[in-house]
Image (tube, rainbow, N blue to C red):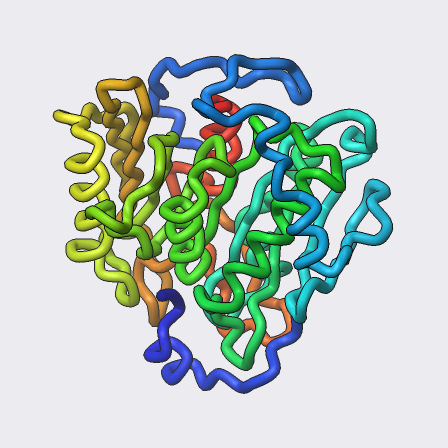
Amino acid sequence: MALFPVFAAACGVSPGLPAGGDDPSISYPPSPPPPPAGDASPDRRADVSDAGAHDGAPAAEAAAGGCIGDPAPGHHVYTCNGIAMDVEIPSACAAPRACGLIVDAHGLTMNALMENDNTNMRALGDKYGYVVVQPNAPGPLAQWDHTNGDPVLYDFLVYAIARLAIDPKRVHMTGFSDGGDTSLRFLCKHADLFASVAPAAGEGCSFTPGDIPSREIPILYMHGTQDLLEDFQTIGLGHRDAIVSAWKMGTGQIVAQGTGYVRTRWTSPSGTVFEFLQHDYTIPIVGGHCFPGSTDKGDVPGQLVPLGCDPPNGFTWGEEVMTFFRAHE
């Protein structure tokens, strides 16, 4: 779990948090060109049809309490079963046009605005044609609850895909720290919902019998080598090795590297891509538990510390996530 209690204790968390540059020396590897927003692309989501992806929508709408009222373009906060969902709907995504959808889940003690200050996902979604869902975890530490919070978020997503006319082939999820845990749990439990996922500094899917995704989907996983909250050796490398072993991926190849980071790619026999992005960047108190390339100022009410890695950084995490999502639909 992320931004752990040791961080909370060190920083003096108070209850009731409000809801709310590329390295020029790098030659990035060739990968499938991202399709223009809204363009049709081959369906990489095996055994998931457009109709099938919406089969659970009526039940999910009932479970979510029909909480999506106004679906017009703009910023909305929909409260569903006690969880506030910050949702950014680009003007290009007004019905009947089908856009993609990205879930961007925050870490412990954070909220949607703090997460967005580090990923810039709302602006990126507007640029490339994605509705962006940034849920706010409930409770005094804003911690994701896999027993109660996960089902509420899942019902909301299934409902939102139908209500907001989302292209079911273009649904993705990312998250940092506690949100990375949530992304991995959703990968394990709901792989049929996503085209790809990009967890950061999280744990939550062991890739062992009984705790493995129902199908292979592309994964981009980031972890800091100096992370003082989520140990790189046991959690970061542990997840890397478990994924490679479970999907029989063989030998990885370095596809990008620069000052302070290395990106390695594995490919399964069926062609599924797994990329592991490790970095050496740090910030005070939590070490490498940070967002590379972020310009977070730490000025959101209730925020403990800014979480942008100290510069210089060789990549920007939010942009890497968006590029990965667009290339794997």
With respect to residue 278, does 29 lie above or below? above
- Left or right of 62, for residue 114: left
Residue in front for this viewpoint, 141 or 61: 61
Where does the image place residue 40, in percent across and percent down from the top left? 62, 14
Quadrant that contains the N terminus: bottom left
Where does the image place residue 70, in percent across and percent down from the top left? 86, 50
Q: Quadrant of residue 229?
A: bottom left
Residue in front for this viewpoint, 313 or 79: 79
The residue located at (18%, 50%) in the rendering is 238
- Left or right of 190, for residue 59: right
Residue in front for this viewpoint, 64 or 35: 64
Tell me if residue 168 can be seen.
yes
- Left or right of 225, for residue 8: right
Where does the image place residue 199, in percent across and percent down from the top left? 40, 47
Q: How many marks?
A: 0
Tell me if residue 309 can be seen.
no
Q: Quadrant of residue 100?
A: top right
The residue located at (49%, 28%) in the rendering is 323
- Left or right of 151, for residue 20: right
With respect to residue 168, does 33 lie above or below? above
Residue in front for this viewpoint, 210 or 179: 210
With respect to residue 143, does 51 lie above or below? above
The residue located at (19%, 37%) in the rendering is 246
Where does the image place residue 134, in percent across and percent down from the top left? 61, 53
